[in-house]
Structures are given as C-alpha cells and as structure tokens.
Amino acid sequence: MILALETSCDDTCAALVGEDASVHASVVSSQEVHERFGGVVPEVAARHHVELIDVVINEAFARAGAGLEEVSLVAATRGPGLVGALLVGFCAAKGFAAARELPFAAVDHLHGHVAAAYLKPACFEPPFVALIASGGHTLLLDVPERRAPMEVLARTLDDAAGEAFDKGARMLGLGYPGGAALSRLAAGGDGSAFEFPTGRGEDFSFAGLKTALLYKLREVDGSDETVRANLAASFEHAIVEALVRRVLRGLERSGRSRLALGGGVAANRTLRARLAGLGVELFLPPIELCTDNAAMIAAAALELEALPYPDYLDLDVYATGEGPLR
Ligand code: KG4
Ligand code: ZN
C-alpha cells in the first residue's frame, strides 16, 4: 500500500491507497481556526499540521484496518503551497519512509488534482483536458497520457477562481471560505440581473470581477435580499462563464473531447451543470476527491519513479508559484 500525506494549505490529510488505485482510507482534517481571520494564516496552518499529522495518519491506518508493515511506498506533496505547512507533511513522510528504508515519491500538488481521476472506481483515462479550480489555483491542462508531461493551456493572471468566490462572498458578508455560501445565495437569484466581466484573453483573470462587484455594491441596496441574490447569481455566472469559455477553447486547441474537473470549485453546482451540458465526456469526481486530499497524492505517486532510500533525504519543498505546472 501507499501511505500519502498532503499538507500544502490548511487541510491535514493522510491516505492509504492500494497499488491498484483503490482507496483504503482517506482522512482529511480541515482547520476551521482560519475562519475568523478571513483567510489561511500560514504559520497557524503549519502549527496545526504539527499537532494533527500523527492523528490523521493513525486514523488512516485504523480506517483501513492496516498495519505499518503493509506500506511499501510513501508519498507526500512537495509543492506548490505554503512552505511551512508543506514541510510538516513532507518531513513526516520522509521520516516514516527512512525509518523503514522504504522508497519515497515527492508529488506536485497539481499533478495530484489531475491524478484524482485515476483512482478507483472511476479510473478516468487520458487523453483529456483537466480544469483544476480551487482557492489556490486555476489551471487548464492538456493531459495526453498518464506519464507524459502535461501542457498548461491556461492559468490565472491574478486571483484563483475559488479566491474570487471567497472575496465576493466576503463583500456580501457571507464569511470565509464563502464559495459554497455564495452559491447557495445565488440559487435564489437571477444570473443575468447584473453584467460582470469574465476577463479577456486566453488566461483566467478575476481581479476585474472583484472590483466590479465592489463598485456595484456602492450603487445598489446591499441589504435587499433579492438584490443580494441577484448579485450573487450574476457574480457566480461570470466566474462559471469565464471558466467555461477557456475550457471550450482548450478542448478545441488540444483536439480533446474529454474533460476532468478538480479543486474545490468543482463542487459548484452551476459549474457542474454548465459543463455537463457541453456534450463532452465529463469526469466529475466525488466532492471529497475534488477538494484537497491525500488519496490523489497517492494516485500521482503511482505515476512517478519513486526514489530509493536514502536518496530523498535532502529533498526540499517548493512554494506557491513554483514547480513544473505554473
Ligand atoms: O480545493 P480546495 O478545498 O482548497 C484549495 O486548494 O484551495 O478549494 C477551496 C475553494 C474555496 O475557495 C471555496 O470557496 C471553493 O473552493 N468552493 C466553492 C464551492 N465549494 C467550495 N466555490 C464555489 N461553489 C462551491 N459550491
Ligand atoms: Zn488543491
């Protein structure tokens, strides 16, 4: 079995996955402590990972009914992410591997989001285009085959899609992280009530949208429930259309007719419905595999050449904005 750890942001995650890509246990402990700060505080996240990492690893073994001796490969997220947070899972994994002289796989977090598609029971096979949209990243990738390099078709120039949802939610007084709450408010509104920008060009850009909502809130009665629902629906509509437009362009450019979704924003019902209506073969993972988890890190590890003991001991992590998929 593969033991995988993921601590790139504010979720402390451990998973045990079989070499046949079956998930025996996937444990995620979300740090709610950041809510009152309106965003993830890196140092606080790292300190909580230190407290939680042993707990989630033990929980994964308990849920899988497995023993330490069943682990034949250890994997962890190397980056991109918050360096202090990454170091906790990465060092714990290296320590676990070194103590047993096991091989180790250092996994790119974004590769992990793509590899979620390879887990059982779905086993969605390349070639496909992957849209990874979360609080930290917005990336459109061409995935020609499992082990071949992925091509970045579009990236974000400023905010990530989930970050845009969160900032919009904050302006509407919906708390943090507010993507799901904004979407719930939007469900009762009219998405065509207000016109919001969807960004120009091939890449994603959500900074203009955020500013547009800020200005709109100065003009309208932000306490009126109908107005608020219409604002939320129009804001959500703009993000979804911005994503869909680049997805269509990416599918056309790469000649693919299959699409996989990943990242927390994949939980968005409007986005899921809109993509389902495109007529392409679509892989929508279960929500727990869209948001950060360690099972996807194990799935990516299966596609990598693991390093034998002790070759991995001096490996370091890398920060947000670094790594092969930028
Ligand atoms: O993948 P994830 O759990 O963590 C990151 O790697 O960032 O994604 C979290 C992001 C947050 O920005 C959150 O607001 C957004 O996903 N999100 C949603 C929904 N559920 C979560 N955004 C829109 N609609 C949703 N239903
Ligand atoms: Zn992520």
Image (cartoon, grey):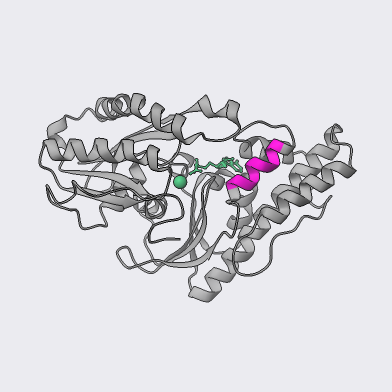
Q: Is residue 69 above or below residue 202?
A: above
| Residue 213 place in picture, x, y as percent | 77, 47
Q: Quadrant of the N terminus?
A: top left
Give the percent coordinates (x, y) of residue 125.
36, 61
**Residues rendered magenta in the picture:** 162-170
Q: Which quadrant of the view contains residue 94? A: top left
- Residue nearest the observer in this picture, 316 or 106: 316
* Left/right of residue 43 with respect to residue 191 in the rendered view: left
The overriding secondary structure of the stretch rendered in magenta is helix
- Position of residue 36 relative to residue 136, above or below, is above
Question: How far across and how far down the image is residue 210, in percent?
Answer: 71, 49
**Left or right side of 152 for 203:** right
Task: Report x, y in % for residue 270.
Answer: 65, 48
Residue 274 visible within the image: yes
**Residue 17 included in the magenta stretch of the image:** no
Q: Quadrant of ligand 1?
A: top right
> Within the magenta stretch, is there residue 166?
yes
